[in-house]
Amino acid sequence: MSTVGLASLLDETEAILGNAPFAAETMELLRRAYLAEGATMMSATRFLLHHWLGKYGLVVLDASAAALKKEASFLIQNELQHGEQTEALIAAQSRALEQAGFHAQAKPRALNLFYFENGQRKRIIYQAASDTFAIHDSMLQFSPQNMAQEIALHPERFSFNVITRPLYQQYILPNLAYIGGGGEIAYWLQLKTLFEARQIFFRH
């Protein structure tokens, strides 16, 4: 997401801060982050985090980087081939959790991936009648062979949704521990059987 157009918002922020302590330094920092040439929300956030916490050894990982998506491209291909299995596994696990007194936190789709087109993130839909993958609300369609080629050449164009993102996250940067409230823990437990099916480490 581009930060173009945020200059007026920063002007409003400056007016609100007025002569507050550190207002001038804060505004200079925000302008460097959000108004730099070619700035995006991601680059601005990374800049600010490095400025404030970099001295403590913070590492900010860009999970949308092509190199990381390429490493995990098998997860994209698995979801394209076995999306219905994903949906069934999550549904069954959600029912088990609800019987144990937890509420399901996320609802799976028949295919849990997005595709980036012209700066927009759009759902990928499998069309069984024609054996093609369509990009929602666009004219783009891919045969399974063309989709495999697209993954190989442009893995960064694919994005995981709320169901498949933890698989990707755990694959590229495995958690030593995950701390969360009841809802967050229930969310991760919804995914337990999916982790097992995709052979990604998951322990609780």
Image: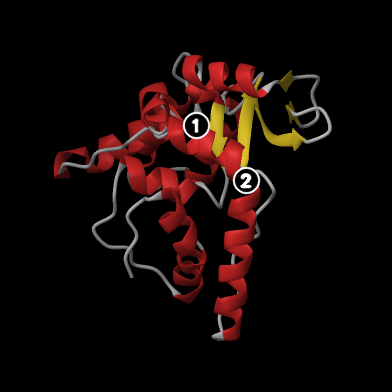
| Mark 2 and mark 1: Cα distance apart in space | 31 Å
**At 63% from the left edge and 16% from the top edge, which residue is drawn?**
146
Q: Which mark is residue 41?
A: 1
Q: Position of residue 128 (x, y in %)?
A: 78, 36
Q: Residue at x 49, y 14 (%)?
A: 153
Q: Vertical placement of 117 versus 82: above or below?
A: above
Of residue 31 and residue 153, the one placed in the foreground of this image is 153
Residue 160, image x, y percentages: 54, 40
| Element carrying mark 1 | helix
Q: Please provide percent x and percent y for residue 12.
A: 58, 37
Numbered circle sitting on residue 8: none
- The residue at the point 28 percent across, 54 percent down is 175
**Image side of residue 150 versus residue 179, left or right:** right
Q: Which mark is residue 83?
A: 2
- Residue type, numbered disc 2: Gly
From the viewer's perspective, tell me whether residue 154 is left or right of residue 112.
left
